[in-house]
Image: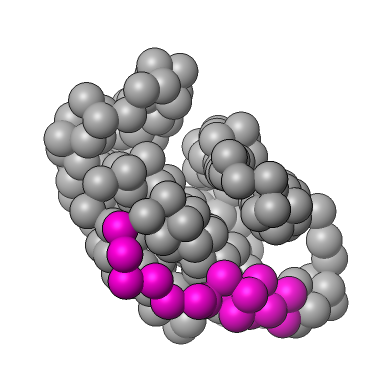
């Protein structure tokens, strides 16, 4: 009987620790999703493409806000892949449409990274970064957003490795420092910096 009580007590303690770990960074994750919802919007001056941009903006916000149930995720993944296909026309010239299509594709990959499981999301994050590398300018803002999606997924792990998160924070702070001079949005920069700073403090 005593052995059973001890085993149950250990199980309860371990379960509590896992639950606490899962919930520990909820405030930081909410801050990230709030930021993504506010800043993911992509506007295109061409009126013929404005509707497609608005559709993708609304879809991305729905994904980041988690306005869906678990059983709706497969349909959302299908929708993200359809949007990716619609924006997969290749362009060789360095034109505004190239920037538009490339950014739209990266948003599709970010939505997929947000929706998919632990084994698949790193691939979609890599795809988002590789897609953005096709435009050497006008991509700094989106690359910083990719970093935040990765940070969100890492903080969502059942067991968060603090040293790894610390390395990511340091890397992302350097990325911000290198790219902020090309981003003409002081609110974006200030909020981004604050998120990284707050997460770094929560790790101490």
Query: Residue at 39% of width from left, 16% of height from top?
Result: 186
Q: Is 73 a magenta residue?
A: no
Answer with left or right where residue 195 lies relative to residue 56: left
Q: Position of residue 197 (x, y in %)?
A: 33, 26
Query: Which stretch did the figure color magenta?
Result: 78-94
Quadrant containing the C terminus is top left
Question: Is residue 89 highlighted in magenta?
Answer: yes
Residue depicted at 75% across the width and 52% down the height: 51
- The relative height of residue 148 versus residue 125 in the rendered view (above or below) is above
Q: How many marks?
A: 0
Asked if residue 90 lies left or right of residue 22, the reply is left
Please give the name of the residue rendered at 42% of the width and 76% of the height, measured from the top-left corner. 90
Is residue 155 or residue 114 the one in the foreground? Answer: 114
Relative to residue 154, is residue 38 depicted above or below?
above
Image quadrant of residue 68? bottom right
**With 134 as the anchor, is 154 left or right in this view?**
right
Quadrant location of the N terminus?
bottom right
* Colour approach in the figure: one colour
Q: Is residue 27 above or below residue 6?
A: above
* Any part of residue 196 in sight: yes
Q: Nearer the viewer, residue 130 or 32?
A: 130
Decide if residue 11 is in sight here. Answer: no
Q: Nearer the viewer, residue 33 or 109?
A: 109
Position in image of residue 180 (x %, y %): 25, 28
Residue found 61% across the figure and 46% down from its top: 46
x, y percent for residue 196: 34, 33
């Amino acid at each position: 009987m005593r052995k059973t009580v001890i085993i149950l007590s250990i199980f309860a303690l371990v379960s509590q620790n896992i639950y606490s770990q899962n919930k520990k960074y909820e405030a930081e994750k909410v801050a990230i999703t709030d930021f993504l919802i506010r800043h993911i919007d992509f506007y295109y001056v061409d009126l013929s493409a404005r509707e497609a941009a608005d559709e993708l903006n609304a879809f991305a916000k729905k994904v980041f806000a988690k306005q869906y149930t678990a059983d709706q995720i497969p349909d959302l993944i299908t929708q993200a892949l359809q949007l990716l296909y619609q924006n997969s026309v290749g362009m060789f010239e360095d034109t505004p449409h190239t920037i538009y299509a490339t950014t739209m594709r990266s948003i599709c990959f970010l939505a997929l990274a947000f929706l998919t499981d632990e084994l698949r999301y790193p691939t979609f994050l890599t795809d988002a970064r590789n897609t953005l590398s096709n435009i050497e300018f006008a991509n700094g803002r989106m690359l910083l957003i990719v970093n935040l999606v990765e940070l969100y997924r890492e903080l969502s792990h059942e067991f968060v490795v603090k040293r790894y998160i610390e390395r990511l924070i340091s890397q992302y702070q350097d990325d911000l420092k290198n790219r902020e001079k090309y981003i003409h949005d002081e609110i974006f920069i200030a909020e981004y910096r604050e998120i990284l700073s707050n997460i770094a403090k929560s790790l101490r």
